[in-house]
Amino acid sequence: MNSTLAILAILDGISYAALVFLVSVGLSLIFGVLRVVNVAHGSLYAFGAYLAATFSLAIAPISPWLTYPALLAASIVIGVVCGGFIERFLLRPLSGQEDVLQLLITFAAFMIMDNLQRLIWGVQPIFAAEPLRLLPNVAVFGVSYTSYQVILLPGVALATLFGLRYFLRRTLSGAVILAVTEDREASTAIGIDAKRVYFVTFVIGASLAALGGALASPTTSLVPGMGADMIVLSFAVAATAGLGQIEGTALTALMIGLTRAFVIYLQPEFEVLVPYLLMVLVLLVRPFGLFGAVQVRKI
Amino acid sequence: MSGRIKPVTTIALIFFLVSAVGPLLVSSWATLFALILAKGIVVLGIILLLQAGQVSFGHAMFFATGAYTAAFWGKYVGGGDIVLFIALGGITSAVFGLIVGLFVVRYREIFFGMLNLAFSMVLWSLLEKMFHYTNGADGIRVPRPALLGLSFTPETFQYVILYVSLLIAVVAFYGVQRYLNSPLGHMLRAIKSNETRLEYLGTSARRVLLIGYVISAFLGGIGGTLVAIIQQIATPEFGFWTKSGEFVFIAILGGSAHAFGAFAGAAMFECVRFYAAAHLADTWQLILGVVLIVIILYAPNGLIALRQRYGQAKQGGH
């Protein structure tokens, strides 16, 4: 492997890691607060991607630059409408019930959304590469790459990382969310509306998944099954990092993104295997994830 | 209750009788019932683990192991016999279950589910990517095997495999019932209610769970072999996480409190799919999703609990 290929692999890895981070951190945030693994997370990603493509194809004839706000608008619409619906009407009635039921009802949401996606957008691949083509290519150590993928995507991922950190650690709303995570009953006793916190967290997490999809839509063709693939991948990242760990998720996404990119150049057939193999190895040694805090076994 | 046949057992007997006689009247039911029984056998394994309070979101790996055992035999050795396929499928997945089980039984709840998922996705990506051995996403065709040296025409064969499935399902149903009522089965249940106390009694909870896990993998493998023979193909899809989700879905649909829940759930699931796929090809998955939501929200203990709840209301709340 020569140095050009190595730089190419690193750039591939970084842009891929940025997208995976956005989706995984949403999943991790939802688990951290609601203690639910949201199986429909991949569908939110797919819906975000499809809606963003629809919006940007519709708006590109007016002005191609409007496709960027269209991507953002699509992710917020999906986050609020789909995410809000899942939390309010599916998860909330089950609060206090067995975990498996909460997991399974998001699986039901996945089945429904997967089907709806095929009904609404069909099974033919959809391309909407306008936002990618608008930005010029940049040369990184002599390798030409789209600035959308090496500057914009990592930029959004970093902004999300620091934005979430600031929101959770420095603002009152963030403190309220952390309080509910720490002890739901005590926080309710001091007047915090835990139900509202759950709702807001779920909508934020869902919007992040949809944002990941919306930003991914210009870089790839949209096909059925993209949601089912993304949920396990983002789950592997979140679990390897330790569920609920925000900074850990970023590092793990980068690690998995880079490993995968190098494997693609060296041994392409093992590309899909990478995240799951890493997940098995990490979980066997550290079941709480690389960055997760060891919990006392509760009986 | 001793000396009296429980109502659930009666319903189970009626169900097995219907699946034996029904297809003789309507021939399109033969494959439908064979699939119901085969999937029910897999779900029995899920229900075993649910007794211990553990949800495996990767059980499709044993299903796929069983299916691919038959497929590989057909591809590399050739020929084959139903009895041989089922024996091999069961043994391979039990051994695989023992290996995976040694790791996963150390963990509980979400960590147990996650590790199972991770192992199953590793298997899935291998099946999908080792193109030279597995034909990738196209899967491997499983040629129609003989039964104890006798070969059959396709018309007869669908009945042969139906009755083989029925026989195995009845044995598995009875076996799981016996197991759950045995001391070992009660210990399995104790993992859910109070694991520490189980350890204080001098029992290794891990060993109890490992035995349950291997049995459950064994059942998953046999079910997978049967489905591969019925559908005459094994594809990586058999080991994808959505398949695992489907099995957990069926278990909750039927009700995990009793072994018969596996067959009640599988019957409902496959019937909805059979008829919805025939008439509403585009939306059957959506319909199943809605059914699942209604069951979870309004009957979280499954179909068999509906009957029990009705029975309790009649007796005045007991």
Image: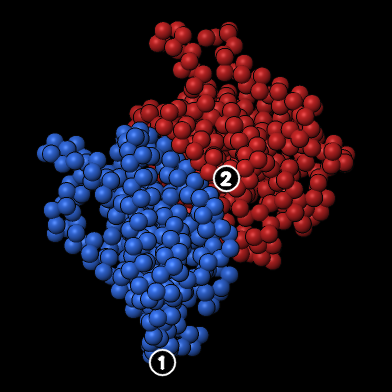
Say which amino acid is labelled 1: Gly
Q: Which residue is mark 2?
A: B283
- Numbered marks: total: 2
In the displayed orientation, state which residue is furthest to the bottom: A142
Name chain B's colour.
red
Foreground disc of the pair 1, 2: 2
Name the residue nearer the viewer: B32 or A291. B32
- How packed mark 2 is, by other alpha carbons closer than 10 Å (few <14, some 14-19, many 20 or more), is some
Say above or below: B291 vs A30: above
Residue A220 is situated, as x and y percent measured from the top left of the image, at 49, 70
In the visual, does B177 lie left or right of A46? right
Residue labelled with disc 1 = A142
Which of B238/A18 is in front?
Answer: A18
- Using the image, name the chain to which the residue with label 1 belongs: A
- Percent coordinates x, y for residue B260 in the rendering: 58, 26
Estimate the spatial distance between the alpha carbons at disc 1 and disc 2, rounded to whole Å: 51 Å
Compare residues A145 and A297 and report the one nearer the observer. Answer: A145
| Residue density around tag 1, few if under 14, some if 14–19, many if 20 or more, within 10 Å | few
Q: Residue at x 43, y 80 (%)?
A: A133
Hey, which quadrant is residue A131 in on the image?
Answer: bottom left
